[in-house]
Image (spheres, helix red, strand yellow):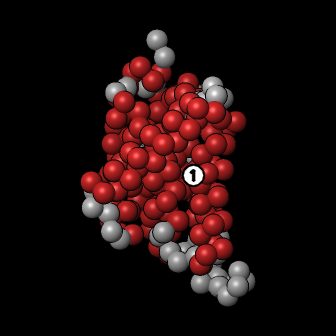
Amino acid sequence: MTMKSNFTDDEWFLLSSAPAMIGAAMSSAAASGVIGTVKEMTASMRSSVAGLKDYPDSELIQALLQKAENWDEAKDKMQDYRERSKSKLADGNVKSREELHQLAMADCKKAVALVNEKCSPEDAAAYKEWTLKIANNVAAAASEGGFLGFGGEKISAEEAAMLEQIEAILGIKGAALIA
């Protein structure tokens, strides 16, 4: 029995997409300009993939980030993920960054409930820490309010507020469990 078999197909998609949604929401929390946005989205992708190295003992994270066996499988997985993501945004009627933030926070709450219910305490903790790392890395990836990449603040007030909200949903502060 594999980790994935503990979840429905929709639940598995939620678990795999919620960290990316958090990264996207964090990236849109404050204006970073084109270069800053690229830095933030790159930080989101790198932080997601880093889960393989950062959580080698987490069966859940290892399964979520499992590589495709061949090019056709990878292409099919990407197409499915893209279609489901577009559908999720359309179904949620997401047309603004505030609506994206609301959807990301709702997904985060559902993902936390799922890992708390269906995973070992260790896997649930790893998933929450991984999600928070993604949010923190995106927030710190680019300065906001500067000029041509100079000056500004590393983490804006909007990003700090979103980080607090994410920490509350995950039940962790920084990287330490509080619940």
The x and y percentages for residue 119 are 43, 26
Is 156 in front, or is 53? Answer: 53
The x and y percentages for residue 7 are 37, 26
The x and y percentages for residue 179 are 41, 41
Give above or below for 176 relative to 99.
above
Q: Is residue 14 left or right of residue 150?
A: left
The x and y percentages for residue 122 are 52, 28
Q: Residue furthest toward the top?
A: 1
Q: Is residue 88 left or right of residue 69?
A: left
Q: Quadrant of residue 116?
A: top left
Q: Secondary structure at mark 1?
A: helix
Give above or below for 142 relative to 176.
below
How many dots with numbers?
Answer: 1
Q: Can the viewer see residue 40 in this picture?
A: yes
Q: Residue furthest toward the bottom?
A: 147
Give the crowd class for mark 1: few <14, some 14-19, many >=20 residues within 10 Å.
many
* Residue occupying the point 44% across, 40% down: 80
Q: Can the viewer see residue 105 in this picture?
A: no
Question: Which amino acid type is shown beneath numbered disc 1?
Answer: Ile
* Residue occupying the point 71% across, 80% down: 149
Q: Residue furthest toward the front?
A: 72
Q: Is residue 107 left or right of residue 163?
A: left
Q: Is residue 101 left or right of residue 45?
A: left
Name the residue beneath numbered marker 1: 134
* Residue occupying the point 27% across, 61% down: 93
Give above or below for 140 relative to 60.
below
* Residue occupying the point 63% across, 25% down: 69
